[in-house]
């Protein structure tokens, strides 16, 4: 486990999946990240690549061939190499060395950089296309935050607030059998109180959001995710259909990609939200989580 630390935060990151496992705030005395209890959901903050969400029949087509790909891809389950580390910074690198060509026919490298600044953690992705042809990919974050943060609170004490990107049309999507479906366009998004019924139909998704905050109405503690420039953000918690309850966490997920739409062709190069990278090209994106 790699530990980053400054005067306010202690952050634990596992080389397995380059996954943030724990964030402790020294002044608030709070643990902000979900525990990874498999009773609800056994992960904490996986990185999604080379797809986000699910494909139709878990397959995609490219250059007249069909490939099988599990939900959210494979990067969350690989072992990264610690490329560089300082007290408040670490870089994790993964180079597959042809090991995934049977399901993803591209040679690539992914480096994930984590940097602490005061009460915030910045996450930066760098993807390099080492293939001789154009590469198609999606990448996303899936951090889960404890809700509630304190024993005397309940999930209903928390509220989501959204800041849309200026001058952009915001579209809300829903998931129908794990496939994305456009629900409506919105001019503004009112604050959304947390309640179990929000997640009865899985995640809900918006396009063109710059910032999402999730805070307690009682204490003011919570998180704020700055994802300016990201095309999508998903909000999710595990929902128990039998008793109508949600898990004790909420995910705020910045995405460069989205699940297949209900009318998707199945061709990777036609997929909604897919990114293209020319041979030798580099893709970079970053988001910041502030722990309040």
Image (spheres, rainbow, N blue to C red):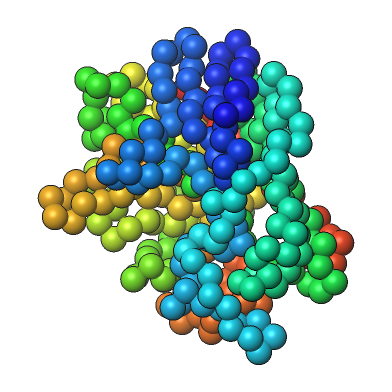
Residue 269 lies, in percent from the top left, at: 66, 77
Q: Quadrant of residue 274?
A: bottom right
For residue 259, say whether it is visible: no
Q: Nearer the viewer, residue 150 or 229?
A: 150
Q: Quadrant of residue 183?
A: bottom left
Please determine whether, in this image, residue 220 is positioned above or below residue 244.
Answer: above
Q: Quadrant of residue 270?
A: bottom right
Residue 200 lies, in percent from the top left, at: 25, 56
The residue at the point 65 percent across, 50 percent down is: 229
The residue at the point 56 percent across, 35 percent down is: 14
Quadrant assignment for the N terminus? top right
Q: Would residue 102 appear left or right of 109 to someone viewing this image?
A: left
The residue at the point 60 percent across, 58 percent down is: 49
Residue 243 lies, in percent from the top left, at: 13, 50
Residue lying furthest bottom in this view? 64
Q: Nearer the viewer, residue 113 or 285?
A: 113
């Amino acid at each position: 486990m790699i530990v980053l630390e400054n005067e306010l935060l202690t952050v634990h990151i596992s080389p397995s999946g380059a996954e943030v496992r724990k964030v402790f705030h020294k002044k608030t005395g709070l643990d902000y990240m979900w525990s990874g209890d498999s009773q609800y959901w056994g992960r904490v903050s996986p990185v999604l690549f080379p797809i986000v969400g699910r494909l139709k029949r878990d397959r995609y087509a490219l250059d007249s061939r069909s490939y099988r790909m599990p939900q959210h891809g494979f990067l969350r389950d690989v072992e990264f190499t610690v490329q560089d580390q300082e007290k408040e910074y670490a870089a994790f690198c993964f180079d597959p060395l042809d090991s995934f060509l049977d399901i993803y026919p591209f040679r690539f490298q992914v480096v994930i950089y984590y940097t602490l600044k005061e009460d915030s953690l910045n996450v930066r992705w760098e993807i390099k296309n080492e293939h001789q042809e154009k590469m198609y990919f999606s990448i996303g974050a899936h951090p889960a935050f404890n809700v509630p943060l304190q024993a005397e609170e309940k999930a209903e004490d928390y509220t989501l607030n959204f800041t849309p990107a200026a001058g952009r049309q915001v579209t809300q999507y829903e998931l129908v059998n794990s496939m994305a479906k456009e629900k409506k366009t919105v001019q503004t998004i009112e604050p959304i109180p947390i309640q179990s019924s929000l997640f009865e139909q899985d995640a809900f998704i918006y396009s063109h959001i710059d910032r999402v905050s999730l805070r307690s109405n009682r204490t003011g503690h919570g998180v704020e995710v700055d994802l300016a420039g990201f095309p999508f953000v998903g909000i999710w918690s595990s929902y128990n259909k039998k008793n109508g309850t949600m898990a004790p966490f909420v995910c705020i997920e910045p995405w460069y990609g989205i699940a297949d739409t209900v009318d998707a062709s199945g061709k990777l190069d036609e997929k909604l939200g897919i990114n293209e990278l020319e041979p030798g090209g580099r893709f970079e994106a970053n988001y910041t989580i502030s722990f309040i």
